Amino acid sequence: MANAAGQLSPLMKQSSGINAARAEGMYIYDESGQRYMDFTSGIGVTGTGHCHPKVVAAAQKQVATLVHGQYAIMKHPPLLEMAEKLGERMPEGLTSVFFSNAGTEAVEASIRLARQATGRPNIITFQGCFHGRTMGSLSTTTSSVGLRAGVQPIMGGVVVAPFPNAFRLRMDEKTATEHCLRELDNILHTQSAPAETAAMLIEPIQGEAGYVPANTEFMKGLREICDRHGILLMMDEVQAGYGRSGLFWGHQHFDVVPDVVISAKGLASGFPLSAMVARQDIMEKGWPGSQGGTYGGNAVACAAALATLEVYDEENLVENAAVQGQRLRKHLDEIQADNPAIVDVRGKGLMIGTEIADADGNPDGERAARILQEAEKRGLVMIRCGAYGGQIIRWLPPLIVNGDQIDEGVNIFADALKASA
């Protein structure tokens, strides 16, 4: 007897009802031809928009030349050129590049490197951060209890410190920052001695927690503590990096230089590619053979990534993210002033979160879900996040978005907000 036809796992759920047939620029089209404005960018991936002609051409050319030159066996021109170009975008001193496929793999590589390079076992991570779903990176992820459900216990040697989320802590920013730095000092005295702490791993602007930026005082405090104790400061720029925050790297808002940067998502405009970049003196302390992967540094993905950087420069996408982000934030602040259901608007550039609450001020994931459903009916696709039932609506349009498209998206959101009441 023939086996029944396969079907998608029910454990992987889609947030919209769209069956995408094609996409171009800001827009996705379903099988019937219905057009949707995409304010998700594939969770921050398609910064150059869908199927940018320059990225498509580079990928097509590479497919006909060399698809897979396995990274552990041989080098190839797109791999070497991408390492060079990415190094040029890095903070000063970070020149040693390891490529992989996904952000979570790059985080795993950073954890291995930190432990090997320092000879210390512990990693300090921060409340609300998301670093991935593989077991090492999941052990450093605290954005939602559902991610860990049913798979604990997970990797040891991880200590969680508070993040200065002033809204969640119900403090002003200065008080929240002082509190978090004090608690971090307490952790170093009570849970993870500096001599046993390899690294601090942090998102400069938290993603899955709802686009919560750190601040300069806090980040400078981390840098000072790390320098004093020989601890590595590792920036997870998977979502905040590559121009989305209005600067090329999210940590640039806070005037600090990390020891390690982790990047993915926007790196290759939709092709799977991630990178972990460190100072050469740190990378040299890792153990030979500790980095690898069958598909890492894939030739087609690297070719697409090189074209992506060209588009960024030619179309001034980082600057556009800053300008359009300001426009978006102004609109959302105005909507919040007239809608008590929106209790917070936060973020930088084109990564902004709007937190939804009920009449009693409690997180309202059900209302946020209804807002997204109403927006989808009107041709706008958005996504949610947040530990309390997905109470935060995320704004993640491609970095090519223009002012008219920002205005259109905001107007649809305003109509959906009213319809969902």
Image (spheres, rainbow, N blue to C red):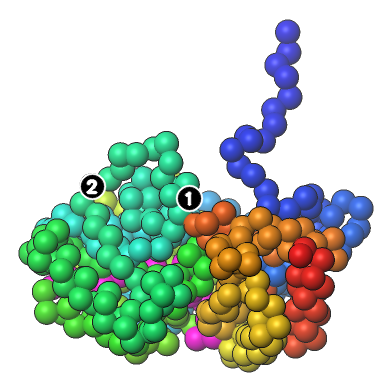
- Residue 244 lies within the magenta run: yes
x and y percentages locating residue 204 in the rendered image? 40, 75
Amino acid type shown at disc 2: Gly
Query: Which disc is residue 295 wearing?
Result: 1
| Figure check: 400 above or below 208 | below
Helix, strand or loop: magenta stretch: loop
| Figure check: 41 above or below 409 | above
| Figure check: 260 above or below 338 | above
User: Image quarter for residue 86?
Assistant: bottom left
State which quarter of the image contains the C terminus.
bottom right
Q: Which residue is mark 2?
A: 156
Residue positioned most to the right = 32
| Figure check: 409 above or below 17 | below
x and y percentages locating residue 121 in the rendered image? 16, 55
Numbered disc in front, either 1 or 2? 2
- Residue 174 lies within the magenta run: no
Amino acid type shown at disc 1: Tyr
Mark 2 or mark 1, which is nearer the start of the sequence? Answer: 2
Q: CA distance from mark 1 to mark 2?
A: 28 Å
308 vs 208, left or right, is right
User: Image quarter for residue 164?
Assistant: bottom left
Residue at image location 31% in from the left, 68% down from the top = 162
Q: Which residues are magenta?
A: 230-247
Residue positioned most to the top = 1
State which quarter of the image contains the N terminus.
top right
Q: Residues within 10 Å of mark 2 (few under 14, many from 20)?
A: few
